Every structure is written in C-alpha cells, then in structure tokens.
Image (tube, rainbow, N blue to C red):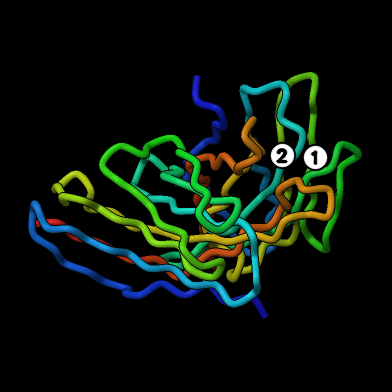
Amino acid sequence: DVKVTQSSRYLVKRTGEKVFLECVQDMDHENMFWYRQDPGLGLRLIYFSYDVKMKEKGDIPEGYSVSREKKERFSLILESASTNQTSMYLCASSPREASGYLTDTQYFGPGTRLTVL
Amino acid sequence: RKEVEQDPGPFNVPEGATVAFNCTYSNSASQSFFWYRQDCRKEPKLLMSVYSSGNEDGRFTAQLNRASQYISLLIRDSKLSDSATYLCVARGSQGNLIFGKGTKLSVKP
C-alpha cells in the first residue's frame, strides 16, 4: 500500500520565518509534487520533480523553493513566510511508466495546514 | 479561460438519486482525464480514469467528448458515503495533472 507522509498536519509560523515542509513516500516513486489548496481556488501546483535533484516549476512557484536530495523525500521551502502563504499544502507522488511518461495516479499525503501569522 | 472548469455545486440529492457532474477543459491537446474524489479534510484520491469510449465502475460512469472538450461523471443510486468533492482532472502539456476546483456532492437520507 502506497504511503505518502508529511512531517506535520498543522503548523503555525510567523511572517518572515523560513519554513520547511517535508514529504516522504515509501514506494520508490520517481515523481513527486507539491500543491497548495485554497477555498475557491482548488489545487494549484507549486513545484514537481521527476527525479532526484531535478525540479520543475508549476503554476505558482513564486515564494517557494524545493529540494530533492533523495528519491523518497521532497521538501518544500518557504524562504520568508508571508500571510498569503497560509494554506493547505499537499504532497503527492507517482511512479513513472515504462514508456517514461507520467502515470495517471497521484498518491497524496494527508496535507499540512500552514498558518502564517 | 481556466484550464479545467466545473460547477462548484453543492449538489444536494436524496439517497438513491442519480446525479451527473460535468467538466470542460481548454487544452485540446490533453490526452488523459480523470476523476478524483476528496472527502472533507482529507487528501484527493483517484476515483477513475476517463477513456474515450466511456467507462463504468459499478455505480460510476465516466464519459469523454473530445469534440466538445467535455467530461462527465454519472453516479447512480447515490449513497450517503458518496458525499464528497469530485475533482475533474486533465493531464497538462508538461505531463502534470491539472485539477478543477471540484464539485461538492451532498447525499441526504
């Protein structure tokens, strides 16, 4: 059974703090993703990674960076947290098809609800 | 125009009802489509893929109309446990998934 875990379910930080959100998957998946989900805006892709040390910008990368030093771990970093980054952050992973193409199913972690004061 | 658009609802239906959700997508090059389900305060989970020929999984039927760039999900004999938000998803040009904002379904006894 695929398991994606996120370091915290709830997090409260202050404006200007550096914030690390950690995501770990145990299924040896190549692809990992970070989304944020806000009421009325749905799921929006921040960054994704096809492989170790690789990263691609999603739709809303501004204010965020990521790190993928190990295959199982994908970290989202808020260099200087701001109140508009208060959101639910969801990590996901998916395997790569033999063809190299991304597969259909993304497995999501339980989410981290971040509040920036 | 948003890449994937769907009616946010809520759809309030009685148990046993048949309910249909629709979704439109803007990128005619999209090749793959899906429906995900998200329960309140939970993560999204894949419900079913949507194939050109249409596909069925128990009480759930998904249809794709490429000419109209339109996807649908039909739920027959609704159960209380079907209450959730249903996310329409298309594969984007970079291979990533693009999620609609979701349609909320509430099934009442």
Residue A32 lies, with reference to residue B99, above or below; the image says below
Residue B23 relative to residue B38: left or right: right
Mark carried by residue A112:
none
Asked if residue B107 can be seen in this view, the reply is no
- Which residue type carries mark 2? Ser
Instruction: Left or right? Give the position of B39 relative to A18.
Output: right
Q: Helix or strand or loop: what does disc 1 sit on?
A: strand
The count of marks equals 2
- Whether residue A69 sits left or right of residue B48 in the image: it is left
Estimate how packed mark 2 is, as few (under 14), some (14 to 19) or many (20 or more) residues with alpha carbons within 10 Å: many
Which is nearer the N-term, disc 1 or disc 2?
A: 1
Task: Name the spot of residue B39 as percent of width and height, x first.
Answer: 50, 65
Q: Label 1 is placed on what type of residue?
A: Gln
The residue under label 1 is B63
- Which residue shows up at 60% across the image and 64% down it? A107
Question: Could you say where residue B64 lies in the image, as x and y percent from the top left?
Answer: 79, 35
Q: Secondary structure at mark 2?
A: strand
Q: x and y percent of residue A110 in the render?
A: 44, 70
Question: What numbered label is drawn on residue B72?
Answer: 2
Q: Chain of mark 2?
A: B
In this orientation, which residue lies closer to the viewer: A103 or B58?
Answer: A103
Question: Could you tell me which residue is drawn at 45 percent across and 38 percent down?
Answer: A57
At x 59% / y 70%, what residue is drawn? B81
Q: Chain of mark 1?
A: B
Task: Give the quarter of the figure containing the C terminus of chain B.
Answer: bottom right
